[in-house]
Amino acid sequence: MSTPPASIRWDALLARHTALELARALAGARLRGLRLDGDARDLALLFEDRTLVWALHPRRGWLRVVGPAEPNEGDFKLRGQVSAVEAPADERIVRFTLSPAADRPLALVVELMGNQWNALLVEGEPAVIRHVLWRRDGARVQRVGEAYQSLRPQARTGLSGDVSEQEWMTALESVPESERAAALVRAFAWTSPLNAAALLGAPSEPGAATGLEVGHERWKRMVDARAAPEPVLLDLDTGLQPYPFPLAGTAHRPARSLLAAFEACADAASESGAPPTGPALDPSLLAGLEGSLRRAKGRVGRLEAELAELEDPTRLRALGDLILARYADIPHGASRASLTGFDGTIIEVDLDPAEPPHANAAQYYQRATKAERAAERLPRLLEQAEATRARAEALLARALAGSADEAELRHALGVGVPRSDAPRETRPSLPYKVFRSSGGLEIRVGRGAKHNDDLTFHHSSPGDVWLHARHVGGAHVILRWPGPGNPPARDLAEAATLAALHSKARTFGSVPVDWTFRKYVRKPRKSPPGRVAVERIETLFVRPEESLLRTLSAHEDSTGDQGRSST
């Protein structure tokens, strides 16, 4: 017993002879409307005396004639006839030219490439899309109201069968047998993976001719436009397959017509429990996969653009240095200044007129640091994004080919995946991050203005050291110190560096950091979060080197607040 088809495989020969048969079958039939069911991927041409249904879901692909049906409210109402059904030479396209009552050129284009089948109603010349069965993502995004993008012809040799045996032999004879089928399909019109084996097979009588010579004769007979088809049902490993000609080496049984062969495929699928209509896979999952792929492609594009537009950090720092060196030459409120460079050349420097020169220099330093960080980060992110895109493309391809089951797709999309009812482990939320100095002292760095107050006045002791970068916004820092006297200079410098790194001066070359004992810090009444009054201040100048963050082994304290005190 033959295996029912997983899906119909379309090639140019099948499209050509299907179009010819449809042209004969539909001659004179009165059209009432079109039904494009994007969910089921079914196209229906509603005639007065019959309905032609083309199942364009990638799990099906057959077409059949059923009884007449009344147009529904959502159908495309259309009175007229099908004046022509054609397949462009060597293309997997079937085009219905429609002749409605109104004088307007209309065509229904059925695209049968790979498993990306679609149907589009187009109007005018050049053609504009009026309706589309389903909208795919990719290079050919087809939208209603946009110009129809016809597919680029394959440009293979021999559209009319005018390939000599010598040309055939020259193209294929020197190709290794394992690669010959691919070479055949690349070179010659009307060939496909479906018929390649028959066109490269051994001769029927040993010694009569080479396999390639016999294949050439078979090809010429099949591509001859005058040749009468011999419709068959091929019995492939994947199931039943309609075809206009028997293929040497492949089991087959004759069919009354190609339409009858398609009908047999639909019936076989129905008998096996697979309905001939309705999607084999939830279309919303396919839409979700396409959305994932679209987002992945968008992220790759954004990262590539960001990487291409990165500023040169060396140049930015040089401009910051130049602003500081030529401080006195910059007019007040200038948006641009011509400054003499260190090599004597004149350099035009853009400025923020609302900021003083030192703040403009700081902005250039910040941009330089941002560019350096981005240069380190973006290639890694781009590599990850490209991997995500590749996975999304592969999963969508498998879904369209029918090799990915619904459970796998739902899991990949996070759709319908049950959530665990197990309670998540919670950890205490502290208003600071914890570092450890090289001398073993704990350093606490506030997480923001509100948390700064909490750290300073509720998570420190009077004898601890309080630090903050001078005259800029930043974190409060507490160096835990049991006393007596001042803490070791190295530990104090490391705490000051953390204060600089967690401030708006983090990109400066040298940052002044104020410090005092916490008992000399108080909170003025009605002052905003983070604002404090400080006495007995001393100042350290430090370089905000980010490597110190790793050196001090930054880690979140997950054990709670040890040594907490209130003031």
Image: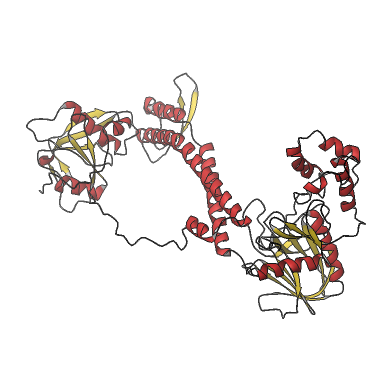
| Residue at the bottom extreme of this rendering | 70
| Residue 473 falls left or right of residue 45 | left
In front of the other: 532 or 197: 197
Task: Please name the colour scheme applied to the rendered image.
Answer: secondary structure
Which residue sits at x=32%, y=30%? 547
Seen in the picture, residue 530 relative to 327 is either above or below; the reply is below
Q: Is residue 295 above or below residue 383?
A: below
Q: Residue furthest right?
A: 226
Asked whether, in this view, residue 531 is left or right of residue 169, the answer is left
Residue that protrudes farthest toward the left in the picture: 484
Residue 465's image quarter? top left
- Lateral position of residue 358 relative to residue 132, left or right: left
Residue at horizontal 89 percent and vertical 48 percent from the top? 220
Could you tell me if residue 25 is visible in this image? yes
- Left or right relative to 493: residue 190: right
* Towards the viewer: 252 or 115: 252
Q: Quadrant of residue 120?
A: bottom right
Q: Position of residue 149 (x, y in %)?
A: 73, 54
Q: Residue furthest front?
A: 206
Quadrant where the N terminus is found in the figure: bottom right
| Residue 7, position as x, y percentages in the image | 68, 60
Picture coordinates of residue 548 (x, y %)?
29, 31
Q: Nearer the viewer, residue 258 or 31?
A: 258
Residue 276 in sight from this viewpoint: no
Task: Pinpoint residue 397: horizontal percent, then vertical percent.
Answer: 61, 52
Total marks placed: 0
